[in-house]
Amino acid sequence: MNRVLITGAISGIGLATSIYFLQKNWTVIMADKNTDNEIMNQIKEIFDKQIMFIKTDVSKENEIKNLYNKIHSNYGGIDCIVNNAGIITHGLLHETSEKIWDEIMNTDVKSIYFTTKYFIKDMINNDGGTIVNTASISGISGDYEMPVYNAAKGAIVNLTRAMALDYAEFNIRVNSICPAAVRTPMLNPDNIPKYAAANPLKRICEPEEVAKAIYFLASSESSYCNGVNLPVTGGLDIYSGQPR
Ligand SMILES: NC(=O)c1ccc[n+]([C@@H]2O[C@H](COP(=O)([O-])OP(=O)(O)OC[C@H]3O[C@@H](n4cnc5c(N)ncnc54)[C@H](O)[C@@H]3O)[C@@H](O)[C@H]2O)c1
């Protein structure tokens, strides 16, 4: 059986990934704190039986517990988790409120702890699975005025390695994707030209391109990849920053 839970699934990368997995005939459980009936109706018209939406705030343990209970009773478990839900903040660290710090850390990082806490036992009992975390290029290098996001995504990168080591003996592979700027509502459209100009490919990434990388890491196509933080950056992360 191919059952995937995708968080942050109603927009951007999560939505493109949900559609890609549906096209590959996976059963997709979409979780998001926001609902969008128009999008869900459109997807259900095409894929009907392979799909379920469960409204979930991934930063809240009781909501992940509820998500687990619903998935366990409907599907008996899960084969893959795409921990994709995330939020960003901009600004200097000393001007960042504790509330924002906690929101980012709880949504981007603690949520992975929660999904693991509730879902991993089923995966172990079902003889394995895969986990794909959505990190970022901002988890492997620093950015100007994004310290909290850098800290959160950096934590995901090393958490991915740690989880990959600990769960390998249960045939559970854990990897992450590290995209550069992707055309989603998270990215301010005014910034697209400057992000495109800075990239070796001279364009930003499309959400469908990230979806394919996530699918690769989620599926048996990547059967010997474990603990990989895969750059999906157009080559931006390999540039030293020195002038020609
Ligand atoms: N867009 C980019 O340039 C970019 C680059 C690298 C990494 N990422 C990462 O990709 C992931 C997806 O972002 P996106 O660009 O598609 O943005 P997006 O804003 O389009 O989608 C994020 C989704 O997560 C959901 N979400 C936010 N907080 C949540 C919560 N507490 N519980 C459940 N759902 C929640 C939102 O409702 C939204 O549907 C994020 O982790 C983001 O950090 C984005």
Image: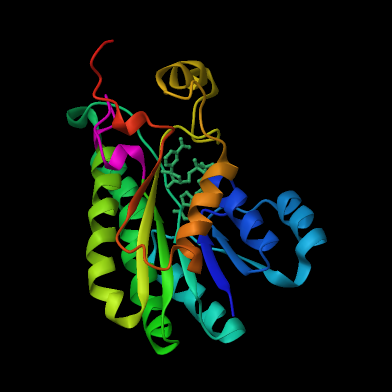
Q: Nearer the viewer, residue 135 or 58?
A: 135
Relative placement, left or right, of 48 versus 107 is: right
Given the current orientation, which residue lies at the most extreme right position? 45
> Mostly what secondary structure, the magenta segment?
loop
Q: Is residue 142 magenta?
A: yes
Q: Position of residue 220 (x, y in %)?
A: 49, 69
Relative placement, left or right, of 26 versus 227 is: right
Relative placement, left or right, of 87 versus 28 is: left
Q: Position of residue 22 (x, y in %)?
A: 67, 62
Quarter location, residue 137: top left
> Quick one: quadrant of the C terminus?
top left
Question: Which segment did they paint magenta?
Answer: 136-147
Q: Position of residue 109 (x, y in %)?
A: 31, 55
Count of residue discs: 0
Quarter location, residue 239: top left
Q: Position of residue 113 (x, y in %)?
A: 31, 66
